Every structure is written in structure tokens, then in C-alpha cells.
Amino acid sequence: MKKAIIGKKVGMTQIFDEAGHVVPVTVIEAGPCVVTQKKTAEKEGYDAVQLGFEDQIARKLTKPEKGHLDKAGVPYKKHLKEFKLENAGELNVGDELKADVFAEGDKVDITGVSKGKGYAGVIKRWGAQRTPTSHGGGPVHRHAGSMGSGTDPARIFPGKIGAGHMGAEQVTVMNLDVVKVDPELNMIAVRGAVPGPKGGVVYIRNTAKTLIVKKAVAAVSYNPQKASGRNPQKASARK
């Protein structure tokens, strides 16, 4: 990946673009992040950097975390995350990354932990269908129903949908637009929704999707049933 940073979700708002259209955005406090570790192909087998985000007091760190940051000689950080950046070789321990690593118009992937929904049934959790509400359905309209044969295989296959804890899992939303960047406030405004609650930690990377710009070109149709196929000189058939 080319660019990455750790941030914290502030909340959603709306801004107006140059044409006066309302754009719903999620505001993210991105950085400043400090490089706490540098990995090289010679030593670890790959190039990467570990970034630290949000200051933390020493007594709230474990001894391994405290020793790791003391060895690097950087301030204590609450959140650490490793990124395989293309320019990892150019960064050194102690370098600082701010929100200006991204610019307006960039496409990004954002990873966060979704909001927890608690214990949920199969209808809410998986979109299952309820049973008919007439002809003696009983008080089981929202239950899971039959789970399979009892004699053979006499067990539930792994992955079968069922009730359980919903949410509170890692989610990545891809190909979001960066609408605005404020390096002074370390703020990035991203078009659309971002997983997680307000104050949740998110990881921002340049998108992994391949962006293909489609160019519409008028072509001559060779279908004889179309007017452009019978008469290539027709305006609709010209390139």
C-alpha cells in the first residue's frame, strides 16, 4: 500500500461542495502517528513500519509494551498497528505522519470495529424468514426452525446460521472518497459512513480496488436491424 494512518472516528456531519450539493461525511481525527518500529527485508523478511497513535500514560501500559516503546525512544502510545508501506524504507523510527498524507479526491479503505448489537435472533442477525402466523404456528414465529436431519448426520454443520452475538466485529468499508483534509486540526472528512461508534479507532489505507475509468465511445453497429448498421453515415453511427 502507498499510504496509511491510524485515526479516531469523531462523528458524522454534512458539508457543501462547490456546486452547492450536500455531501454526508464522516469526520476522522487522523494522527499524528509516530513510527514506533521499522521492519526490513534483510532482518524480518519484509518491509513495513509500525505506527503508534494517541498518547498514553506509562502505568496503563503492560511491561512488554512499555519496554518496546522505551527501546524505540518514542512517546508512549495507546494503539499500535503495522502497515506494509511502499515507502517504508524512507521512514525512520520517530518520524511523524499527519493527516496530510492523504489529499482531497483520494480513494481509501477504512477498517474499524462495528457497533455491538448484543444477542440477536436469526431474523435480525441473518435476515431469516419467520414462520407463517396462522394455522397453529405457535409462539415460535421468530425461532430458527429445523436445523437439519436428526439421524444422519445427527449434528449441526459448522457455519449454520443461528442466534448469537451480533456486531462488534472488524469491518472494512472500501473505496470511500476523501472530501476534505485539514492538516492543522488533523481532520479527514470522508464521504459516507464508517464502521464503529464515535471515538472508535479506525485504520485508513489507500484503496485496494483498481479504479477503471470508463470512456463512452460511439461505435458503428453492425446489426442490420439497427439504423446505424444500415446507414453508417447516420449521425448516431459516427464516432
Image (tube, rainbow, N blue to C red):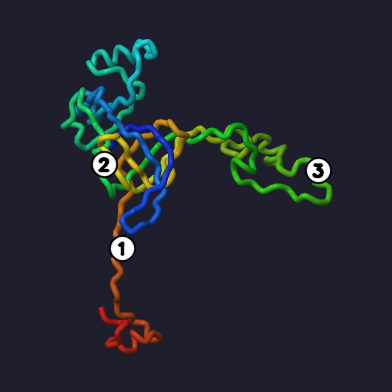
Res. 102 mark: 2
Note whether 4 is above or below 135 in the view shown.
above
Foreground residue, 47 or 59?
59
The secondary structure type at the circle numbered 3 is loop
Question: What amino acid is labelled 3 in the image?
Answer: Gly
Whether residue 146 is visible, yes or no, is: no
Residue 208: image location, x then y, percent: 32, 45
The residue shown at (24%, 38%) is 101
Determine the residue located farthest toward the right in the rendered image: 136
Circle 1 residues within 10 Å: few <14, some 14–19, many ≥20: few
- Mark 2 or mark 1, which has the lower sequence index? 2
Label 3 vs 1, first from the N-terminus: 3
Q: Residue at x 25, y 28 (%)?
A: 49
Q: With respect to residue 102, does 119 lie above or below?
A: above
Position of 131 with respect to 206 (left or right) is: right
Q: Nearer the viewer, residue 41 or 26?
A: 26
Q: Is residue 47 left or right of residue 192?
A: left
Q: Which mark is residue 138?
A: 3
For the residue marked with disc 1, what is the amino acid? Lys
Q: Residue furthest left?
A: 90
Along the line of sight, the residue nearer the viewer: 207 or 157: 207
* Left or right relative to 115: residue 95: left
Q: At 57% from the left edge and 36% from the top edge, which residue is drawn?
A: 158
Along the horizontal axis of the image, is 151 left or right of 85? Answer: right
Residue type highlighted by circle 2: Phe
